[in-house]
Image (cartoon, rainbow, N blue to C red):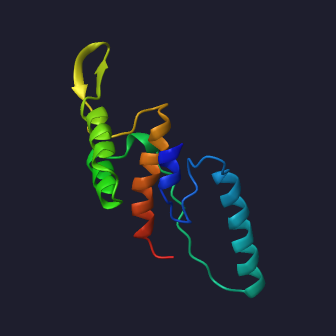
Amino acid sequence: GRLERKVRHVKEQRGFIRGIDGIGHNILLLQEILKSVRERKREVHMIVADVSRAFDSVSHRAITAMMHARGWHPSVIGYIEKLYNESTTSVAGRYPVRCSRGVRQGDPLSSVLFNMVMDHVLMGLPT
């Protein structure tokens, strides 16, 4: 939606973006790179990262830090912080436990928040 359009992604980011077949695009890109490397008889080094349980891995502190770093409006930051600070889970219906990481499964905002944090990680990698 509106918030998603305001979040710019690094060009290497292909996951969880509306209207983009990230896997298909990356497969085609990889095929082109390998074809070019073979034709030019050059060497190539790649890192392929498949983030296991990706949505569960994002720290709430990282989400907050990235929202501030990108200059999000304080009221939006406050709303999202409240949403996540009040988030709990329980095992077998007992004792609620406060969550300190992970984005909400099924929430349309989750992919935006996840990608924002992953963009920061990707910007730190050499190209």
Q: Would you identify the image quadrant in which residue 84 lies? A: top left
> Which quarter of the rendered picture does the N terminus lie within?
top right
* Frontmost residue, 55 versus 71: 71
- Residue 123 visible to an observer of this rendering: yes
**From what the image shows, is residue 71 above or below residue 84?**
below
Asked if residue 18 lies left or right of residue 78, the reply is: right
Q: Position of residue 58 (x, y in %)?
A: 36, 46
State the image coordinates of residue 125 (x, y, percent, origin top left): 44, 71
Q: Is residue 53 visible?
A: no
Q: How many marks?
A: 0
Q: Position of residue 79 (x, y in %)?
A: 30, 37
Left or right: 23 as drawn, with respect to 104: right
Nearest to the observer: residue 89 or residue 20: 20
In terms of image quadrants, where is residue 82? top left
What residue appears at the point 43 percent right and 54 percent down from the top-left corner? 116
On screen, residue 54 versus residue 77, left or right, reads right
Residue appearing at x 47%, y 33% in the figure: 107
Image height of 26 relative to 1, above or below: below
Determine the residue positioned at 45% across, 32% down.
105
In this rendering, the answer to whether 81 lies above or below 31 is above
The residue nearer to you, when weighing 87 against 82, is 82
Give residue 88's position: percent from left, percent from top.
28, 26
